[in-house]
Image (spheres, helix red, strand yellow):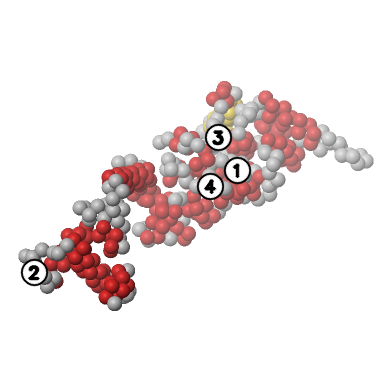
Amino acid sequence: MKTLVDSVKDPSEAERKGGMFGVKGIIPFIPEAIDPSLEERGCVEFVVKVNQSGTLSKNNSVKRRIQKFSYGTTEELLRWKRELDSIIASKPVTDPMGKFNTAELILSDDPLNTFKEYRRGVCESIPNVPGGQAPGETNETFQSVVNRFLGHYFPKAHRNPAGTQKKYMRCHLKKPRGVRVNQVFLRIYQMNALLPLFPEPDNHMFTDLELVDIIITMMPQQWQHQMAKSLNFEPTEATLPELQTALEKLELLDDVESKKDGGDSSKNKSSKDKSNKQKGQFKHEQKSKKFKANNGKECPLCSVLGGKADNHTLESCYFKDKVKKLWKQGSPRDKTKGYNDKAELNALITKKANKIIKKTFKRSGVEYVPETSSSDSDGSE
């Protein structure tokens, strides 16, 4: 399976446009690329207990290799802090001096120098009071140095980094097209686990119910509707494993539809729309050619009936044969005899056509008054 970085071409695909007024999360959903040269920064090996209640022995110990932190992303810095806490708890390291030394062992370059400066500033500073003494290395000063060290590398624009990160996760994330459902859950779990490592305040993890809301909001709206319709599933009342199972079913259905359509369903739909648009454009062009082929001639029958007359000639008129057939069915004239002139034929056709149109209007509940009625009445008087 592809990693998150390989699955998405642009990291902004995992973020909603216009959300949070352009503020980005401190830990993005798509991890930042890691510099390959960081692999060469060296490792430190520790022997830690497997069972903390037992004594350190060959059967109750394991070796752990921790990579030194020299530079990198904020997420890597927080992972360094988590490794430090894990080593201190599992070795275990109870002496404050040992905690300081352990932290410095897994640092190098600029971060190591920064940590030593904070250590000197906190542990060796003498309070400005009579008889004041330097506090030295204690559990309290160790925690103070670590917090200052982390704050030094956090983005200075955020007064409340944990609050900003939680807003980003709640409001600004969406599932990218190429990312699988299990990858979404895994990444959200990782981001949630890093929240307690942020500086205070608000540095507590989301509850399971809050994570359910975050993940539902990330999913396409079509999936949210399908969960209620097709699966009869209420996501807001589900546990995280239940939600993951339901979403993976929808993902599987989406995969089947994509294969049936010969590729990505959304892309296939857009290609169909494009094809239909091209067909409609082709028909419009064909009609335009026919209109131009009339050379400016109009259909005299449609001119009398009030229809569109400039897009065809009398030879290709749809109404011509229909009017002639209806006139023959109801005309009292002897069909074997001819007409006195062309004007008489046109008058009869017009009269019959008006009757047909009048019947059609009457069915719709609209009164039809032909334009030629006034001229006919004038002539009769």
Give the mark nearest the N terminus, 3 or 1: 1
Give the mark nearest the N terminus, 3 or 4: 4
Crowd around label 3: few <14 · some 14–19 · many ≥20 (10 Å): some
Front one among 232 and 220: 220
Q: Is residue 91 visible?
A: no
Residue at 62%, 36% (x, y): give it. 74
Query: In the figure, 41 relative to 164: above or below?
Result: above
Q: Mark 4 points at which residue?
A: 16
Give the mark nearest the N terminus, 1 or 4: 4
- Separation (CA) of disc 1 from disc 4: 11 Å
When asked about the image quadrant of residue 100, the answer is: top right
Crowd around label 4: few <14 · some 14–19 · many ≥20 (10 Å): some
Residue type at mark 4 is: Arg
Where disc 3 sits, the SS reads: loop
Where disc 2 sits, the SS reads: loop
Residue at 71%, 36% (x, y): give it. 152
Residue at 68%, 35% (x, y): give it. 153
Measured from the top left, where is residue 149 in percent x and y?
71, 36
Q: Name the residue under label 3.
A: 32
Pair 3/1: label in front: 1
Give the mark nearest the N terminus, 4 or 2: 4
- Separation (CA) of disc 2 from disc 3: 93 Å
Q: Farthest residue in the bottom direction? A: 381
**Residue 83's disc number:** none
**Residue 24's disc number:** 1
* Quadrant location, the C terminus: bottom left
